[in-house]
Image: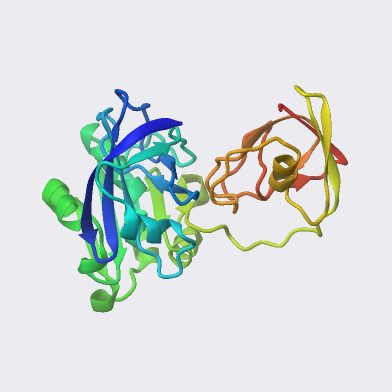
Amino acid sequence: MQQTIIDRIEPVAEDVVSVTLRGAAGPLAPWEPGAHIDLRLPNWLTRQYSLCSDPADREHYRIAVRHDRLSRGGSEYIHRYLRLGRPLEVSLPRNHFPLLPAPEYLFLAGGIGITPLLSMLRAASDAGVPATLVYVGRSPEKMPFLDELRDRYGQRVRVIATRRDGRPDLAALAAAFGPETGVYCCGPGPMLDAAEAVFPAERFHAERFRPVARTFAPDTPFEVTCARSGRTVPVPADASLLEALTHAGFPLASGCREGVCGSCELSVLDGEPEHRDDIGAAEGRMFACVSRARSARLVLDL
């Protein structure tokens, strides 16, 4: 974890605040566009937020938080109780949504989904790569960083306020860009589903706020052997791997508990995991909050 101090809090749209964190002990860890961090809040909650500042600025991290009326305690605490000068622990940045090389980019943002795309658009612009941002929201007042984007990028930013303009024609948008265009999308699930249906899978990259609803076989018990300690931990059918390990004295970092943030990643040395995450676990890795085992036993690097 890294120690930071809240350096600035400011509204950037209706129900959205920008929070700038300053390193308490010198430069912060480096990061690349698309990365996010975990915030360990004083109310004992851990939440994940995309970094939306300049990666070249090692003194500060910036995030933006929308006040969710159905908040589980994270966004409400940030909006109501965080104050300037407050110390906060944050994780090292993680990136499951990296910006890959392409001759041209299309960034498609929905509301607060603009946050990971801000640094991507900056990186593409700084590299001289053609890039277009299509920014969708209910109204301009609800779209964070809109003035900043217009001032910096001008006509490269297309704003679609759905109350005024209706929903974007994503099929027409897909037809307007060449086959090599890298498409990066972040926003509400329905928008991502619609975009995924019209853009070719090989050039479409998305980050979701919530996991895609999928059906899996019924949960069954399995065992995990912790290679470094030599202990074996049973995982009953009615508990997650994360819960079983925590109860056995192997506390893991965890945030979303939905398979979208990546904070509970584990190394698998033997056995076959059943991946249920929305990130796409790399070979030999799994996410303990949602994933289980196809084999009767897993060996983990714990």
User: Which residue is at a point 49% across and 40% down the rendered structure image?
Assistant: 96
Foreground residue among 33 and 170: 33
Q: Is residue 15 above or below residue 206?
A: below
- The residue lying at 29 percent from left, 71 percent from top is 138
Position of residue 269 in the picture relative to residue 283 (left or right) = right
**Rendered view: 231 above or below 114:** above
| Applied colour scheme | rainbow
Residue 72: x percent and y percent?
49, 62
Q: Is residue 51 left or right of residue 247?
A: left
Asked if residue 31 can be seen in this view, the reply is yes
Percent coordinates x, y for residue 202 in the rendering? 50, 45
Quarter of the view holding residue 52: top left
Total marks in image: 0
**Side of 19 where 212 appears, left or right:** right
Q: Quadrant of residue 287?
A: top right
Quadrant for residue 219, please give it: bottom right
Quadrant in the picture for the C terminus: top right
Residue pictured at 25% horizontal, 58% vertical: 144
Query: In x, y percent, where is residue 125?
Result: 22, 38
Give the camera-side residue of 107 and 1.
Answer: 1
Q: Residue furthest right?
A: 296
The answer to which of 186 and 247 lies nearer the viewer is 247
Residue at horizontal 35 percent and vertical 69 percent from the top: 169
Is residue 99 visible in the rendered image? The answer is: no
Q: Is 150 placed above or below 301 here?
A: below
